[in-house]
Amino acid sequence: MQVLKQLLFALSMATLMGGTAHAAADQKAGAATAALLKSTADHSKFKELQRPFQSGPEVTKACLTCHTEAAKQVHQTQHWKWEYVNPGTGQTLGKRHVINNFCTSVSSNYKACASCHIGYGMEDGSKFDFASQENVDCLVCHDATGKYKKPSGFAGNPVTKDTEFPPGSGKIIRGIDLQAIAQKVGKTRRETCGACHFYGGGGDAVKHGDLDSSLEQPDKALDVHMDAEGNNFTCATCHKTDGHQVPGSRYAPTAMDKGGAHMRGKADSSNPATCQACHGQAPHGMAKLNDHTDKVACQTCHIPAFARGDMPTKMSWDWSTAGKRDAKGKPLVITNDDGHITYNGIKGDFVLEENVRPEYMWFNGSVKYTLLGDDIDKSRQPIAINTFEGGPDDGKSMIWPVKVFRGKQPFDPVNRSLVVAHLAGEDDTAYWKNMDWQKAITAGMATVGKPYSGKVDFIETVAMWPITHMVAPKEKALACTECHARGGRLDKIEGIYIPGRGGNRIVDTVGWLAAAALLAGVLVHGLIRFVNRKH
Amino acid sequence: MGRVYIFTRFERLWHWIQAVLIIGMLITGFEIHGSYHLLGFEQAHRVHTTAVWAFIGLWVFAMFWHLTTGEWRQYIPTMKNIDKIVRFYAVGIFKGEPHPFKPTRERKHNPMQAQTYLGVTVVVTPLIWLSGLAYLFYNELGAAGFRVDLGTIATVHTVGAFLMLAFLIGHIYLGTTGHTPMAHFRAMVTGWDDDH
């Protein structure tokens, strides 16, 4: 018996080890497959790129020798134009035109802001040559080395030689090697898109709340699609780009997608970045959950909170308290326990939050902006920087999660208008240099050719940011009770009946009273019987 | 003194399964309605809809049974002697008077009882069933072109639930009014009605 056992053990061990050796061989074969170059071109072998580059446009010219139509494609994008005319509202929007309640406007701050322009040298949006092909920046999206940088203050140009900036500050910006970068270009990555989109509003996580650097290497809990160990989506997996036209923009979002999942080979002009473009209209195994998809945006349940990647997002910004200096006369800076700035003399007070529960509202995809020159009535503050339109009955609206960003920013009480403040720059009028609102607004309004009365006041404003990234794994989606309850997440949503949120008050009152009266009646009846019992 | 076999095995089974399902649906239904928290909305909803399908299945059998056995005739309403029944529950019961109605195989229910069961069957139950199915298949109804307000459906369903609750309170209490408080319950379990 003992011998038999030993024999069996030896046999099973041999099988196991044989299996392991086999698996190792498989792995080796797998590695060989992974090493297969997906691109048909090794850019380091191109003669055009085997030379030093002094500037961005020089690189672009080299790119264009093969990719002859690329710049013309980019010219048609919002990334390039920074302008979007909303066909629904007729408003001219885009970065060149809107006023927000972060740094308010790019108009007088191009040298800083244009570091996120997909071009070179946009020092002034009204004078920039939008027909220039060589000023298209290929590398900012196609850099595969992670070394390409467009520092603030250079109007979107990379720095190729070590440069002291600001001049006289003693701080050196290291020059980057454009040749090495150009020879290694590739597809866009989370990091390339993120270089701008994770840092909107002037810093990591500041603006969107659902986009920050934690999405460079997210885990599954943070983003089920981008999970670096799992699905590993890039931005372009959903924002499926064709001819450099990137779909999905918050200026005209797709609030409701009634179409089915896109199919390979089948032409489909609808937005490929929606959830439905992959998941269709009935993604849940449980029929009752699918019943929600006509009114509730997927994001509402599947993004239980934003700013979940340990990066706090800015929830409010009060410019009216800016201007304080410390004992040394430098702008006062106050940080919280986590080291994040909550007050800065050149910017004012901030409120930062992590794991933020969104607010919810009906949204039909139409966004109306308050633009420079629009009449502002202070008695009606907070002024909506933008308004999400829609309601329960228009047949086009869904309930969406939203980051509501509250601000208090300068405005002109005489001309009743929001203002452009000149913030960034090395000149005397920049607020971040001299902390003088008069100079900053005078200079800012001059750049857009709008009148400024000379009086400055501060006004409360509110801006809407749709929440659509950081989709959680399904186990982390909202439980029913989050909304199906009194005081739940959708407590303020009007126009629909939500079971569990409270029914018809009269029916409830009369019903419970009648039940109680009946119960009391039978108890009294029974009590009399008990008292009168014969034995 | 007599002993009558009044409730057949199927009838008793039907009654008690139905009792469990109705009480279960009342408890979970009012939770879904938002009246209190017990199981949590999701679990309450799951139990409620599962019970619904069990209930519908049970009723298919019950209707078949009533039609094939002719037992549906038990519920034909009559006003004959109803005054005596009402008087008994209002006065006689406190004096220890005997119940004026003697159940038989042919007529199991006193007139008041028969009328109540009929009312529950033809008014309350359809009210709950129709509104409940509309509630469950609200999206399918909408897709088929019947745009009904969910709030209205829910309100009708709630009214039905309160009526059922009222019936349940009365029904359980009247169950204690046999010759002993447990007599009727025993009959509903064994099928035999002991008549003193």
Image: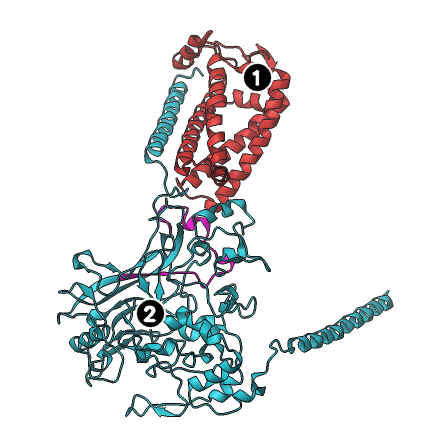
Work out which quarter of the rendered image holds the N terminus of chain A and state it.
bottom right
- The circle on residue B72 is 1
Asked if A346 appears above or below A411 in the picture, the reply is below
Q: Secondary structure at mark 1?
A: helix
Work out which quarter of the rendered image holds the C terminus of chain A and state it.
top left
Q: Residue at x 16, y 57 (%)?
A: A379
Chain A rendering hue:
cyan
Please give the chain letter of the residue carrying mark 1. B
Magenta stretch holds residue A208: no
Left or right of B69? Residue A300 is: left
The location of residue B111, given as percent across then percent down, is 48, 12
Left or right of A225? Residue A368 is: left
Total tally of numbered discs in the picture: 2
Q: Residue at x 47, y 30 (%)?
A: B128
Q: Are marks 2 and 1 on the same chain?
A: no
For residue A71, what is the image quadrant?
Answer: bottom left
The location of residue A139, given as percent across then percent down, is 46, 80
Name the residue beneath numbered marker 2: A95
Asked if A525 appears above or below A502 in the picture, the reply is above
Amino acid beneath label 2:
Lys
Chain B rendering hue:
red
| Real-space Cα separation, disc 2 to disc 1, in angstroms | 76 Å
Magenta stretch holds residue A468: yes
Q: Which residues are magenta?
A: A462-490
